[in-house]
Amino acid sequence: MGQNMVILKNKNFILRHPRLSDLEDCYKNQNDPVAKKMFMTTPKNISEAKKELLNHINENKKKRKHQENFVIDIGGKAVGEVWISHIAYDYEKHKASFGYVLRKEYRGRGITTAAVKLLTDYAFKKYKLKRMYTHTRIFNKPSRQLLEKAGFKIEGILRKNKWKNGKYLDDCLYAKVK
């Protein structure tokens, strides 16, 4: 592993920066049918996934990042991903958003909840944040429960927040403040 690679450990997994060797796993994670339903876009093919992964790898190397990406590594496999995004260095330097995805066969074990807790603790400390937030589809009850278990509070419903597949989607806004 690279000497600047950030590693966050839990008893069941590690969070680490992605490597090019994670390409197939990351493509599988993002093209899971549930993930495709929840995200606005996912890579259409392995070539698009490689371009996105290389962007993440390069962004992670920057001193002033606007996004930091991690894979959820279990036994050397990247079975999921978590990321911090919209890291600002100007007047909104106190907050950032985040997201997550976990492959179907690993869901329901508390892995993503633990990964989100680890990620947010890390982000609060490293970036000196006062607020972490995310959106989840209003109909995505497992994600809403995960966020609540991770200590996030619902702040409201963003009505008609996204347009996908010919219809408007409502999102829940969740946040944790320090």
Image (cartoon, rainbow, N blue to C red):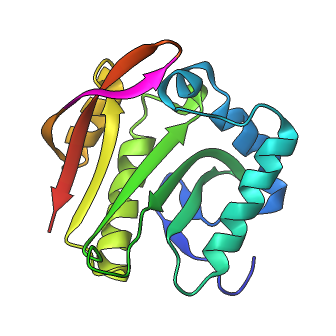
Residue 132 location (% of width, % of height):
27, 60
- Magenta part, dominant SS: strand
Q: Is residue 14 left or right of residue 84?
A: right
**What residue is rendered at 36% in x and 71% in y?**
123
User: Is residue 10 at all visible to an observer of this figure?
Assistant: no
| Magenta span contains residue 7 | no
Residue 73 location (% of width, % of height):
63, 53
**What residue is rendered at 65% in x and 34% in y?**
42
Against 147, is 66 above or below? below
User: Is residue 94 at all visible to an observer of this figure?
Assistant: yes
- Quadrant (top left, top right, bottom left, bottom right) of the N terminus: bottom right
**What residue is rendered at 40% in x and 62% in y?**
119
Against 176, is 27 above or below? above
Q: Is residue 87 left or right of residue 70?
A: left
| Magenta span contains residue 163 | yes
Residue 70 location (% of width, % of height):
57, 60
- Of residues 87 and 78, which is closer to you in this image? 87
Identify the magenta region. Answer: 158-164
